[in-house]
Structure formats: structure tokens, C-alpha cells
Amino acid sequence: MSTRPSSSSSDPTAAAAPSTKPRRIIRRPKPSPSGTSSSSTNAPSSTLPPHLTSNRHLHHVISTTLPSDYEFEILKTIDRIEKTKALHVALQMPEGLLMYAAVVADILRRFSYAAVTVGDHTGDGDASSKKRQIDISILSDVTYGACCIDDLTASSLQVDLLVHYGHSCLVPTTVTDVPCLYVFVEIRVDVGHLVECVRLTFEQEASTVDDVGKDDEGRHVKIVECAVMGTVQFRSAVVEAAQRLNRLHHDDDDSCIIKNDQESSTARSLVQFQAIVPQAKPLSPGEVLGCTAPSGLATLDWKEAMMTPRERREFAKKNQQDVNVASPTGQVALQQQTQEGEATASTSSKPERIMIFLADGRFHLEAAMISNPSLRALRYDPYSKTLTEEKYEIVKMKRLRREAVEKVRGLLGISCGSMTRGDGQRNQVANDVSNIAQSGEDIANSLLSEQPTISSSSSCSTSNNNRPPKTIGIILGTLGRQGNPGILARIRSLLHKRGVRTMIVLLSEIFPKKLEMLSGGSGGVCAWVQIACPRLSVDWGHYFTVPVLSPFELFVALGEVADSTLWSRATSAVEEESQQITSNQGGDIEGGYPMDFYSKAGGPWTNYFEENNDRKVLAYGT
């Protein structure tokens, strides 16, 4: 133990000392020698206790009853149970993991508080019990994602700790009613097989085309820029796959052998991969949800994205130190950089930009495809070990959602000049609405025939005669924490300012038949906005008898979003098909539909926008 001179003011010689500032000495503990463990006092607080790490019986039970490729973090869970002194624990799992719920419950019940014996003091005065017995409750309601975390049910059951498996921390533990622990259940996969599938696929494509450029060393290669993503269970595999893809072209010749069924040749790889792991904060790097995905990948500066944080800081510092472009020296330097860039472009082909997605289904991948429609998408299934190219009809989806938005605007008599589509033949939104409206055609026509009045507080015009106000139903999802009361209050305030009557309905799951019963009659609900899952409107909205909008689409309908991505240039089925083909080939005709429901960069319709993050009902001036 190192000693330090005392600086106490009680020392009588301290006043006579000179007023020079003493030198600050920082002594860090030396790392423990290999083979020896550090003392418990120097160990970090996150270190698991020895009675868990050295319990051979516990490790044997885990290895023989649970799949070896699934990380349920049993030791961490037991440690949290003991530290929080929880006696009633609830487990919540998606349906794909429910088969292991009983096994996990038995392990937690058997080994929690196993170190507490007679005479041990646990901090609450109980020193007589040999072992604490805990109760385990399994919450078996359907769980689609982390937004379905059911802390409210757990609180009603007087649960001391809720363990949510299989999803990331969407709902902060600071706002849940009971202490929560998120277990991602990471799954180990064959990353080498994934990388090899991608390499062989693009090498085969590069060998059949002439559009091959040169790399930095003058070798003929095809540049492939990869955005590697996946679900939270494969986040470690996603990062490892990106690292391996970046190393492929720089490895030895042995790792770049192209094997054929008829012959083998030791040729350099024809493909150079430049892989990144994009992030939509606050999600983990590479993580994609069904409603939240990284956007803007088609226009991303790939060289900057490939930099490490240190390289990015050095690059920014270098730019600040560069000479002024306005000076003659700066003009010469700029001209040289331009010539070098043109020379590089002439010797290298245009890079192909793609998405590589690691998941066993399409639902999460579709969010990335909706947000980045111009990128080619490849999905690797870790269970079947197959690499497939996936397509999404983004143009058709936008047409269906645009029709729903225009129908709501027609029913409410709203006309926004800022929402028109630029083409002179489609500036008259009222004409489109009259063609779209079917069951509510009489209501739409009566509203369109009236002269709208311009509201001074909005760029939209709304019919505001003595007719009874229309009713918009607001659905607050009660499946776990799907519904956000903060978003509900914001939407309700917007509708009330426009003289629209609202009806709030709480639903755990939204079905067409149930909404049809609430929408019937002349005084029923003419449209719905659901604060549950945006993909419900995107994927199933056209199956409902009345429009069911997501919060983003309602903001579009009310004119709160000035530049909507819903407007398509296609005016016929032939143009729509042609536009879809162009989008699939990498064209940037269609902008991405926002998938940002849990992104910190989202708008006022998202969960992390300003006060929405508090999940509280606020007045917003009403």
C-alpha cells in the first residue's frame, strides 16, 4: 500500500511552507500477475461473486439444460436478484424463447440466495433462514419487442424484479414501475460462413462483368460498400462480420483462394469490401427494430464512416489547419486534389453499396429497406445458413399510405398547399380524395363542396362551418409499453386546435373487426391514429374499413410535416412498376419512409422527442 504525505491543515508547519503548488502524483494499482486473482477490494463492482463463478454444479446445470449458443446470462440475473433482495421475480420472453422459460425459472429459484446460510447477515436483519425461497412468475402474453415490456402487470403482481429477455432497452428502467433487467440473449452464429457466402457471391458477380476498377495498389477489384446490420441477438456477430469483411482483401493469398468445382486457382480476390456498422441511437451499433432503422445510407460519406473516432478527430484537425481556399496557395492545392480525385475515379469503378442483414426473418430487415429503399439488401439466415437477396415494394407501400393520408385530409376538409406534389396535374388534392373515398364518399363530397377558411395559426385550411365536428379515434396501445401517453397528448392537442373531436381507446391488440364496430354509423369514428406500432399501419392499414394512420402519417395529414416522403411520381400502374424496378436497381427516385419511432433523431411523433421521452400526459397549451 502506497503512502502519501498528509495535507491536513492541523499540521503546524503547513503555514510556514512556501505557496508553491504541490506536484500531483497519480498512482494506479499494478495489474495482477497472470494466474492470480486480484483481491475483492480492488475488483470492480460489476464482478460476479465467487459463489456464482466457481459453482460447478450451477455451470453444469446451465450447460446441460439450456442451448449452448444462447446466452441467457443466468449468473448476472442471479447476482441482480441477490443484490436487490428480490423475493418475487417475473420473467418475460418472446414466443421464440418461451420454451426455455420454465427451465430458466427452475435454475433461478434453485440457485438464488444459495450462499445465504444460518448466521449470514443479508442487510435486512434476517440472519436465521438457511436459504431464501423466491417466487417466479412467467408472463406469457404475446411480446413483439422491448416496447411490450409489461412492468405494469408485474407491478400489479407485486413483483420485485422483472427480467425481460430477447430485446434491447427501449423503455428506460428509470420510467418503469418495477426494477427491470434486460437480457439480450445473444446467439452465437457461424460468422465465418456468413463472410464466405458474401465473398463468393460478389466474386462470382465480379468475374462476369467488366466494370472492375483498381484498388490503391493497382490491382483490379470491385469495391463493395457494406452496411452490416441485424437484430440485437446477433449484435456481436454483426460487428465481427464487418471486421472480417474489411480484412478479406488485405489478408494473405491463402485466404483469397477462389475454388471451383473443376479447378482451383490461387488468385487475388476480385472484390474489396468496405464494411461499416451503422447506428440509429440510442440502439446498439448495427441494431435494427421493426420500427427503427438507420437512414441516409445511400448518401452517407463512406470514407468518413470507415474512420475510427481517433482518425475522425485527426481528419477534422487537419482540415482546420489547411490553407485558406481563397488564397492562391489554397487554389493550387484545391486544383491538385480535384485532379487526383478525377484520376482515382477514372481508374476505379463506382462502388456498389449494399445492406447485409443478419436475421432469421424479414420483419426487421424490412424496416431497413423502407428507410433505405435504393440499397440492395442481402439477408443471411444463421439457422438455414443461406444468403438471399430480398425485395420490398416501397412504391406500392407509399401509394397505399398516401391514399390513406389523403382520405383523412378529405374527410376533415383540410387542404395544405405545402403538401402538394409539385406536378400540376396533382395539385388538386380534393379531386384525388373524391376518387379514393368509398364508404365515406358522401361525407368527403359534402366537405369538399364547402369553402374552407384559412386558419391564422396553420398553413392548412379547414372547413369550419356549423356542421358537427368529425371524430378521430386515438388508439393507445396497452400491450406492455407500446403506447406513449406523451405522444397521445401531443396528437390530441393538434386535433383539438383544428376543431376535431377525439375519442381515446385503449387496446392491447388492434383488429379490423373491433375498429369496424367503433367506426359504424354517421356519428362514428371516421379515421384512427394508433400509438402502438407504426408497422401496423404500414403493413396492414389497407385492410381496415377506415384509415388507420401512424403518428407520423397524422402529422403529414395535418400539414405539420412540410416535406413528406409519401408523394410518389408514379401516376399509373406502369409508371409504378417502372419506378419500383429503378429503386431495386439502386436508383434514388424514392426517398426513404421514416423508420424512427425509437430514434433520438426522430420528429415529434417519436418516443424520444423532447417531453415524449417522459411518457407523461402533458397539456401542450390546451
Image (spheres, helix red, strand yellow):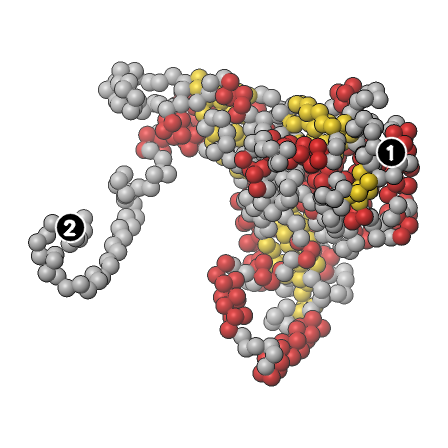
Residue 293 position in % (x across, y down): 64, 44
Extreme residue in the left direction: 12
- For residue 388, say whether it is visible: no
Q: Residue under label 1, please give it.
A: 447
- For residue 468, say whether it is visible: yes
Q: Residue flagged by tag 1: what amino acid is it?
A: Leu
- Horizontally, residue 608 falls left or right of residue 400, namely left
Relative to 362, say whether 135 is above or below: above
The mark that comes first in sequence, 1 or 2, is: 2
- Horizontally, residue 47 falls left or right of residue 23, namely right
At horizontal 79% and vertical 28% (from top left) the residue drawn is 470
At horizontal 61% and vertical 27% (from top left) the residue drawn is 143
Foreground of the two, 216 or 590: 590
- Horizontally, residue 496 falls left or right of residue 135, namely right
Q: Residue flagged by tag 2: what amino acid is it?
A: Ser
Residue 54 position in % (x across, y down): 34, 32
Nearest to viewer (mark 1 / mark 2): 1
- Horizontally, residue 455 falls left or right of residue 130, namely right
Q: Residue under label 2, please give it.
A: 8
The image quadrant of residue 132 is: top left
At horizontal 56% and vertical 31% (from top left) the residue drawn is 616
Q: What distance separates the C-alpha of mark 1 from that of mark 2?
A: 83 Å
